[in-house]
Image (cartoon, grey):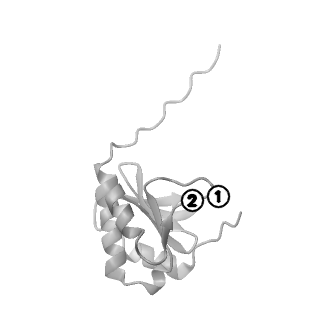
Amino acid sequence: MNWEKSSPELVELFRALAPADPRIEQKPMFGWPSYFVNGNLCAGLYQQCFLFRLSEKDAAALLKLDGASPFEPMPGRRMKGYVLLSNPLGRDRKELARWIKRSLEFAGALPPKTKAKPAKKAK
């Protein structure tokens, strides 16, 4: 499996499009820059693509665009609600910002993630 790093130009574009929202936390997901809200992945990079977490309606709309595809990090392991958009460096920044905003709205409406409690040690 090829785990290609995102180009520095793509990382710079992704960071430049960060929403001005105090709920956003930027941290890596599998080594790629990502945005989280309430512990839920909102948007991120995956190789040379943008990754968006969207409602079913928005995911269907995004999938109609050239270069959009369902997110499948491993063959046969499609992640429902996640869509990749290829060639973000060649796309309009306003369009990308709109999809990030939709991702933020969707992920922000999800229940906050809670930290898992450590398992009790066997006696």
Q: Does the residue at mark 2 contact the one at mark 1 (Cβ under 8 Å)?
A: yes
Q: What element carries label 2?
A: loop
- Around disc 2, counting alpha carbons within 10 Å, would you say few (fewer than 14), some (14 to 19), or many (20 or more)? some
* Residue marked by disc 1: 75
- Where residue 23 sits: x, y (%)? 31, 56
Looking at the image, residue 118 lies above or below residue 19 = above
For the residue pair 81 and 50, the one nearer the viewer reads as: 81
Height in image: 13 above or below 103?
A: below
> In front: 4, or 117?
4
Q: Please identify the quarter of the rendering in which residue 62 is found.
A: bottom left
Tell me the quarter of the image containing the C terminus.
top right
Crowdedness near tag 1: few (<14), some (14–19) or many (≥20) residues, C-alpha within 10 Å: few
Question: Rounded to the nearest whole Å, what is the CA distance between mark 2 and mark 1?
Answer: 6 Å
54 sits to left or right of 123 = left
Could you tell me which residue is drawn at 55 percent across and 55 percent down? 78
Q: Which mark is residue 72?
A: 2
How far across and down, in percent of the image, does residue 52 sit? 42, 63
Give the vertical position of 13 relative to 54 (above or below). below
Expressed as whole percent of the image width and height from the top left, the position of residue 6 reads 57, 74
Where 19 falls versus 29 (above or below)? below
* 24 vs 53, nearest the viewer: 53
Q: Which amino acid does label 1 sit on?
A: Pro
Which residue is found at the position 57% from the left and 78% from the top?
A: 7
Residue type beneath disc 2: Glu
- Residue 79 drawn at (x, y percent): 51, 53
Where does the N terminus fall, quadrant-wise?
Answer: bottom right
Q: Which residue is drawn at 63% across and 57% down?
A: 74
| Observer able to see residue 85 | yes
